[in-house]
Image (cartoon, rainbow, N blue to C red):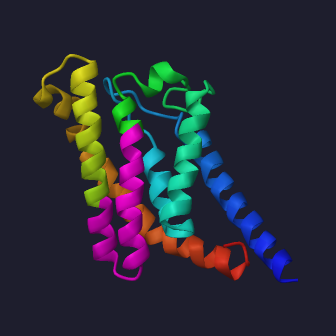
Amino acid sequence: MNTNVKEQISIKTMALIAIFSAITCILAPFSLPIGPVPISLTNLVIYFSLYVIGTWKGTASYVIYLLIGLVGLPVFSGFTGGPGKLFGPTGGYLIGFIPLAIIAGIFIDKFYSKWYLCLVGMILGTVVCYAFGTAWLAYEAHMNFKAALWAGVIPFIPGDLIKMILAMIAGPVLKKALNKAGLA
């Protein structure tokens, strides 16, 4: 009987990871092109996944999403996919979401009930993502760092802060509902 419980937990965990990968695949392609870097909902889904399933499972769900896009399915912004998108000018942000998830997730896991520390973690993770993505954009698009910063960071700060606040408010509510239903 103990083996069945472990299998059930394992299946539940895999299902939650798959669900968040699927949510990312569904929401990330819908983007607002405002320049070389579009506004997307990818980081919002990452923040939610960290609140609901934790650092490592949330990061795994995002990595699965990246692999789905890498093989060519149109799950990246603007319904694109493939290595050209992942390793193109905006690919640094896509890859930078991995350390974002790890850093923000560690803070959320450790300080779950302290919203201000969760916010600090999301901000720090996002700064690392911004730095990686901006350096990659500058190199790939042959831009100076200041131009890349204006193309890939400055316009996104207000919206990203709103996404963090939404995740801080709704993430715990969603996790509580899933726990109550026995799904998380």
Q: Magenta span has 49?
A: no
- In the image shown, does 180 or 34 lie closer to the viewer? 180
**Above/below status of 113 relative to 109:** below
Q: Position of residue 25 (x, y in %)?
A: 60, 40
Which quarter of the rendered picture does the N terminus lie within?
A: bottom right
Q: Position of residue 56 (x, y in %)?
A: 51, 62
Q: Position of residue 84 (x, y in %)?
A: 47, 19
Residue 122 falls left or right of residue 151? right
Q: In this view, which residue lies farthest toward the front?
A: 3
Q: Position of residue 109 (x, y in %)?
A: 43, 74
Q: Magenta span has 107?
A: yes
Residue 125 falls left or right of residue 22? left
Identify which residue is drawn at 26% across, 18% down: 141
User: Taken as a whole, is the magenta stretch helix, strand or loop?
Assistant: helix
Which stretch did the figure color magenta?
A: 95-122
**Above/below status of 22 relative to 71:** below
